[in-house]
Amino acid sequence: MSKILLVEDNEMNRDMLSRRLQRRGYEVIIAINGEQGYTVAQTELPDLILMDMSLPVMDGWEATRQLKATPETQNIPIIALTAHAMAGDREKAIDAGCDEYDTKPVEFPRLLEKIRTFIE
């Protein structure tokens, strides 16, 4: 069973996404801010990380940079999840180290396809 770390501060988004991923057979681990996401990724070593970019404590941009700079987590694929859908935001996420980018509100079939390209 593939393990996904969901780093999301919005409870409603977190609950909806984690339930839908679990129904598809994924093990879902939760973190509610970037700092916690970084720490949990170190201990759990998930197969993939879904990273909200607008997070408290440490934002998703910085958490991603730190994860990609750490040997144990640098190869874990990270998909940025963000409501920031302005021109240049995808490039900003890729520059921070994200492997893929998706916008909120999440279109689940599209996100699932992106997840599958990395872990199936």
Image (cartoon, grey):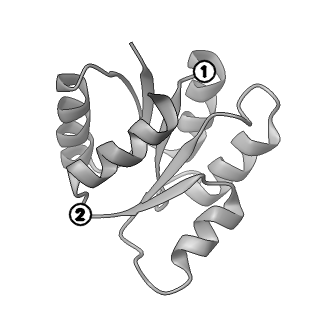
Element carrying mark 1:
loop
Rendered-image quadrant of the N terminus: top left
Q: Is residue 41 above or below residue 81?
A: above
Q: Residue furthest bottom?
A: 87
Q: Position of residue 110 (x, y in %)?
A: 28, 54
**Which quadrant holds residue 86?**
bottom left
**Amino acid at circle 1:** Leu
Q: Is residue 26 visible?
A: yes
Q: Which mark is residue 105?
A: 2
Q: CA distance from mark 2 to mark 1?
A: 27 Å
For residue 35, side relative to residue 118 (left or right): right
User: Mark 2 packing: few (<14 Cα in 10 Å), some, or many (20+)?
Assistant: few
**Which quadrant holds residue 72?**
top right
In the depicted view, which residue is nearer to us: 3 or 59?
3
Q: Does label 2 or label 1 sit earlier along the sequence? A: 1
| Residue name at image x 81 percent, y 43 percent | 69
Q: Is residue 59 visible?
A: no
| Residue name at image x 48 percent, y 30 percent | 119
Q: Which mark is residue 87?
A: none
Element carrying mark 2:
loop
Q: Position of residue 44 (x, y in %)?
A: 56, 17
Rendered-image quadrant of the C terminus: top left
**Amino acid at circle 2:** Pro
Name the residue beneath numbered marker 1: 45
